[in-house]
Image (cartoon, rainbow, N blue to C red):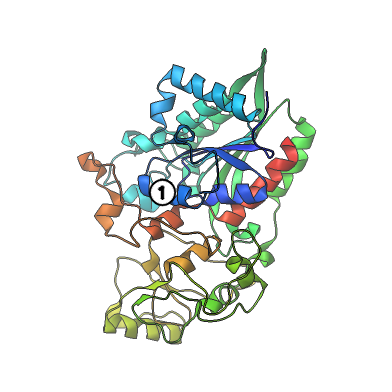
């Protein structure tokens, strides 16, 4: 059997717009199969991987994972084909839909219990894929709220997490004629500890097949996940975004970089896909479109920037607490989390909300990475209406980015996994 990829093969489930995958690919994995239900996010994923011979084949793309996992013959056939074409699959990764586990996501579910939301059960489908494909490793990620979530209002705190963690701890697969289980590590990690300019907690379940590494090796390699202390690697926002500041900004798109890179951080984001060049002043720049703000809103933002984020008394609302992005972090490191709502934040020096490109940099996407679909959209279209049985959601660019795992976090996790499975 001839393996068609030279690096460990990655099967990417619930892939979103591709943040986790890009990080894992940067670490050394090669994605050979992608699953993502939402067509807009899937378009973003694929349009940034046009050079992949594997992902441009329709048989290596999947929409609804249930179309595979609920048909045993289909699942077995897929797993057999992937192993035949790519050998011992290196990693199955995925972040099943998390809106029902996060606080804000559940509030947008219009008071349905979490047990009634279909997406909240998809972790079981990921486990089914892992059992069939039998990868050397698997990686599950989700929101911090999963740790304390209840299936029903009267349920026990943390009961969902108990179900999820026990499901992945029990995974057993067949290798040749042997049944093999996984070493499993579970914990909470923070994006800022991977050099990401956010304090973004993520729940991680990491499994390594027991025939791949010993218990001692597994404990040694996963111990840094519990004791990371690399906050200093997360850039200050002025170092991250200042090359995109255009004092002549106005509503609409900016199609070119307004300045040359000012430091190594900015150079790294402006580096071309092949790594051979760095964009200079006047070169093409995508996703830098400024929102159109009412004159009163601009005055509000100017006041906030000049007064340490204080919102003028006549313009305060109970809906949400808007904040000014800090130029620099305190000694504790990053203090923000990029969400699906860009209006949560005001730029640190200009009276406007962040652009898609700036939002993407907060998630450590390189500047060459582009996003399909609308720039933004309204609340109901973005949230759907589960109470009416409407589960479809718009995924504008800001939401795709906000839902993603930061690229640098994916890279850091990928490097840890590679050491154990190589």
Q: Residue furthest left?
A: 388
Q: Residue at x 45, y 67 (%)?
A: 286
Answer above or below: position of 226 versus 2. below
Query: For the residue carrying disc 1, how many other residues have a C-alpha within 10 Å: few (<14), some (14-19), or many (20+)?
Result: some
Answer above or below: position of 392 versus 276. above
Q: Would you identify the image quadrant in which residue 38 lies?
A: top left
Q: Is residue 258 left or right of residue 250?
A: right
Front residue (pair 224, 267): 267
Q: Would you identify the image quadrant in which residue 264 lies?
A: bottom right
Q: Residue at x 66, y 64 (%)?
A: 276
Whether residue 187 can be seen here:
yes
Q: Position of residue 343 (x, y in %)?
A: 36, 68
Q: Residue at x 64, y 58 (%)?
A: 193
Front residue (pair 77, 178): 77
Q: Position of residue 370 (x, y in %)?
A: 46, 59
SS at circle 1: helix
Q: Is residue 85 left or right of residue 47?
A: right
Give the quadrant of the N terminus.
Answer: top right
Q: Residue furthest top?
A: 177
Front residue (pair 394, 273): 273
Front residue (pair 21, 342): 21
Q: Position of residue 139 (x, y in %)?
A: 59, 39
Q: Position of residue 280 (x, y in %)?
A: 58, 76
Q: How many marks?
A: 1
**Which residue, given by chain and number where applicable, does mark 1 sit on?**
43
Whether residue 336 can be seen here:
no
Give the quadrant of the C terminus.
Answer: top right
């Amino acid at each position: 059997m001839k393996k068609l990829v030279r690096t460990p093969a990655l099967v990417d489930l619930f892939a979103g717009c591709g943040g986790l995958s890009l990080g894992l690919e940067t670490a050394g994995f090669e994605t050979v199969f992608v699953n993502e239900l939402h067509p807009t996010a899937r378009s973003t994923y694929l349009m940034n991987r046009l050079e992949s011979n594997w992902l441009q084949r329709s048989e290596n793309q999947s929409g609804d994972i249930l179309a595979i996992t609920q048909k045993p013959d289909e699942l077995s056939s897929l797993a057999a084909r992937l192993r035949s074409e790519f050998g011992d699959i290196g990693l199955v990764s995925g972040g099943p839909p998390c809106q029902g586990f996060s606080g804000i996501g559940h509030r947008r579910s219009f008071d349905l219990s979490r047990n009634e939301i279909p997406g909240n059960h998809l972790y079981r489908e990921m486990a089914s894929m892992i059992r069939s494909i039998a990868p050397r490793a698997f990686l599950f990620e989700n929101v911090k709220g999963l740790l304390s979530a209840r299936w029903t209002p009267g349920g026990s705190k943390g009961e969902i997490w108990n179900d999820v963690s026990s499901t992945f701890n029990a995974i057993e697969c067949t290798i040749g004629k042997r049944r093999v289980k996984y070493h499993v590590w579970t914990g909470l990690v923070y994006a800022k500890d991977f050099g990401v300019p956010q304090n973004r907690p993520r729940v991680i379940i990491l499994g390594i097949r027991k025939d791949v590494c010993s218990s001692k090796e597994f404990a040694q390699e996963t111990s840094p996940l519990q004791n990371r202390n690399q906050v200093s690697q997360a850039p200050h926002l002025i170092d991250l975004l200042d090359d995109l500041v255009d004092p002549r900004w106005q509503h609409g798109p900016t199609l070119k970089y307004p300045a040359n890179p000012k430091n190594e951080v900015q150079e790294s984001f402006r580096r071309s896909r092949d790594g051979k060049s760095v964009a200079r002043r006047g070169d093409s720049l995508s996703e830098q479109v400024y929102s159109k703000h009412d004159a009163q809103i601009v005055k509000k933002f100017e006041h906030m920037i000049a007064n340490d984020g204080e919102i003028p008394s006549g313009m305060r609302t109970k809906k949400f607490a808007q904040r000014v992005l800090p130029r620099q972090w305190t000694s504790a490191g990053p203090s923000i989390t990029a969400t699906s709502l860009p209006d949560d934040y005001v730029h640190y020096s200009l009276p406007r909300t962040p652009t898609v490109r700036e939002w993407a940099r907060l998630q450590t996407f390189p500047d060459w990475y582009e996003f399909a679909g609308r720039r933004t959209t309204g609340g109901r279209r973005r949230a759907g209406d589960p109470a009416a049985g409407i589960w479809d959601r718009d995924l504008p660019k800001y939401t795709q980015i906000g839902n993603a795992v930061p690229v640098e976090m994916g890279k850091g996790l990928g490097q840890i996994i590679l050491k154990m499975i190589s």
